[in-house]
Image: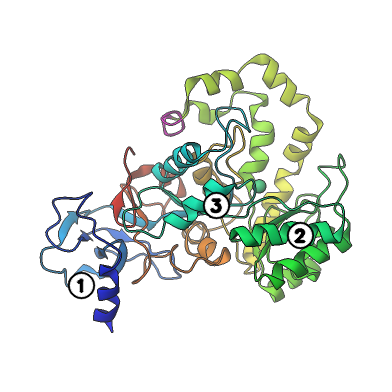
Amino acid sequence: MKRTIISLFVLFGSLSFLYPAFGNDGTIAFVGATVIDGTDAEPLADGALVITDGRIRTVGPRSAVTIPEGADIVDVSGKYIMPGMVNAHGHVGATVGLNGNGGYSTDNLLRQLGLYARYGVTAVNSLGGDGDQGFTLRNEQYDSDLDRARIYVAGSVVVGDSEAAIREEVNRNADMGANFIKVRIDDNLGVSQKMPRSFFEALVDQAHTRRLPVAVHLYYLDDAKFMLETNADIIAHSVRDLAVDQEFVSMVTEKDVCYIPTLTREVSTFVYESVPDFFSDPYFRKEVEPSIIEELSTPERMSRIAGSRSAQTYKTQLPTAMANVGTLYDSGVRIAMGTDTGPPARFQGYFEHMEMHMMVDAGMSPLDAIRSSTGIAAECIGMGDIGTLEPGKWGDFSVLTENPAEDIRNSHSIESVWIAGNRVPGE
Ligand SMILES: [Zn+2]
C-alpha cells in the first residue's frame, strides 16, 4: 500500500532542481524536533518528519521512523515544527501599499503569497475580489516545486438586484472554478442596505446546487442565526453586536458550522488612531515599507480614525467579539483562524500571528489556537491535503526555535518555512 502511494509521488516531479544536493528522488528528513502536527495529538518530542516529492511520507518518533537511504537529513534537534498556518479568510492580489486597488495582477498576487509564506502562512482562502490570475495560480499550485503560499478563491463577492441576478453571479463564479461563494449579509453599521433575505436564500440554494460552500460576512447575531437557518456554511467574521446566546450556540453546534473570528480585522479599523505598539516590532518591520508606517503615523490620518464612527464602533465591540470566541470555544465550536488580511493596513503574515495570539487572549489554549490555525482551518475550508502533518499531505510547515504550544507569542520564532518540502526563499 505504502509503495503504491510512494510510486504515485514520482509523478509529481523532483525537488532536485531546487535542492541539487538531494541524493535520491527528492526525500528530505527533518529529525529531532518536537512536532506539533495540527491534529488533536499532543506534541511529539524528538520526532522525524520525512517528505518525498513535496508530500509527507512518514512522521513519528525518531526511534520508530526509518529514514530512507540517501535522504537529505536536516538536524532540527531542540527545535519545533508546526504545520503551515492556514488563513481561512483573506484577500489576495489587489492592494499595493495603502491603495486597496493598486493593481490586481499575477505579480502582485505572487508578491503577497510570498509574503504570507515568509511568515509561515502557507495557505490563504481568498474570500472575494479574485480575478482570472488568482484562479490560474490556484490551479498551478498542486506541484512539488511550489514555494509560495497556496491560494483558494471565491471570485466576486456576490451582489445583485434580483434573485435571478444573484443566481447568475453565483453561476459565473462557479463556472470560473471558485472554491467558495462569498456574500455580505450586514449593512455596514447601518450605512448600506442589507441584502433582502429572499435573495440570500436564493444565493445559498444556487451555491449548493453548484456544490459550493457559502461564506458569510456578518456582524449581527440575528443575521448569524438567519444564515444558519438557511444552511449557509461558514461564518466569516465574529458576531459583534451582542453576546452569543444559547439559541445560537445550539444552532451552530448542531449544524457544525465553523466560525472565523477575524479579530485582527477589528483591530485594523481603529488601531491607527495612535501609533500601535507593533510598529516597533522587528518582526513586523522586516516586511513593511517604512513609507507605509510613516503614512499611517501622520497626525491627520490618526485623527481621522480617532473621529471615525465606524472605527470607534468596531473598537467598542471588540470585547464582545473576543468574549464570543471564548464562549464558542468553550462550547466546542470549530473555530478557524482567519484575519481578513489583504486590504490596506491589514498586514498579511504578521496579522495571522496576531490573530492567533488574540485567540489565546480570548481564552483558547495555545495548542488549540495552533490547531485552529492549521488543521481545523484547513478542514473548515474543505482542504483535506493541507493543515496537518500526516502521511500523504503536502509538506507545508515551519521550523521554530521556541515552543509556540508553551507561549503562543513564540510563533514569532520561525526560523524557516517549507512548502511542498521546498524552503521558502527569503525568511
Ligand atoms: Zn473579507
Q: Is residue 284 found inside the magenta-colored segment of the image?
A: yes
- Is the residue 64 above or below the residue 99 in the image? below
The image position of residue 112, as x and y in percent, is 48, 40
> Which amino acid, by three-letter code, is at mark 2?
Glu
Dominant secondary structure of the residues highlighted in magenta in the image: helix
> Which amino acid, by three-letter code, is at mark 1?
Val
Q: What stretch is highlighted in magenta?
A: 282-287
231 displayed left or right of 391: right
Real-space Cα distance between discs 2 and 3? 41 Å
Foreground: disc 2 or disc 1: 2
Which image quarter holds the N terminus? bottom left
At x 65%, y 71%, the residue is 211
Real-space Cα distance between discs 2 and 1? 53 Å
Question: How many numbered markers are drawn?
Answer: 3
Q: Name the residue under label 3.
A: 360
Foreground: disc 2 or disc 3: 2
Q: Mark 2 points at which residue?
A: 168
For the rendered model, the colour scheme is rainbow
* Secondary structure state at the residue bearing disc 1: loop
Which image quarter holds the C terminus? top left
- Disc 1: residue Cβ within 8 A of ligand 1's nearest atom: no
> Which amino acid, by three-letter code, is at mark 3?
Val
Q: Is residue 142 found inside the magenta-colored segment of the image?
A: no
Q: Mark 1 points at which residue?
A: 65
Q: Tell me which label, 3 or 1, sits earlier in the chain.
A: 1
